[in-house]
Amino acid sequence: MSAVAATLGAAMLAVADAAQKSSGAIQQEFSLNGKLWRQLYNAERQAPYFYNVETAEAQWNDPRKGDGTEKTWLASLVLFAPFIVVFLMGAAYLLYIKIHHPDFLQPPKKAKGGMRKARGK
């Protein structure tokens, strides 16, 4: 049964290859992580797209360039780094005050005897 499945799989792959070749001109073939990719051209969108021969996956983004998450992470780090630094410096300052001057963090003590009455009234 596995020989029949292999033959059927090869026939399906040949049909898919023929369909891909007829729908768009193959501009380039390349291997990425052991999988064969084809760069094809879509005449309707006037743009290249990428087709994985083994998984029959098609996508507009070039798989060789990644999905862009590295750049997004770096941009987020650059944007939020100053806020993180200020927060950590404030926390360090409060810890310093708590250790070296704990009386600064206590509420003010009430004066004994209350308010005095004004003289002459």
Image (cartoon, rainbow, N blue to C red):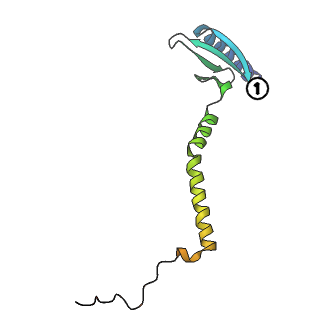
Q: Is residue 42 left or right of residue 54?
A: left
Relative to 77, residue 8 above or below? above
Asked which quadrant contains residue 86, the reply is bottom right
Name the residue: 60% across, 43% down.
77
Is 13 in front, or is 42?
42
**Residue, far left:** 121
Name the residue: 68% across, 25% down.
64
Relative to 43, residue 65 above or below? below
Relative to 92, residue 109 above or below? below
Is 55 in front, or is 10?
55
Q: Position of residue 71 (x, y in %)?
A: 62, 34
Name the residue: 51% across, 14% down.
45
Can you identify the residue that label 1 sits on?
A: 34
Name the residue: 68% across, 17% down.
13
Kind of residue at badge 1: Gly
Total numbered circles: 1
Q: Position of residue 38 (x, y in %)?
A: 67, 16
Asked which quadrant contains residue 102, the reply is bottom right
Location of the N terminus (image quadrant): top right
Secondary element under disc 1, as helix, strand or loop, is loop
Q: Position of residue 34 (x, y in %)?
A: 76, 26
Is 10 in front, or is 76?
76
Location of the C terminus (image quadrant): bottom left
Q: Is residue 13 left or right of residue 106?
A: right
Assess disc 1: are there few (<14), some (14-19) or many (≥20) residues with their C-alpha within 10 Å of its C-alpha.
Answer: few
Is 71 in front, or is 35?
71
Q: Position of residue 15 (x, y in %)?
A: 65, 13
Asked which quadrant contains residue 48, the reply is top right
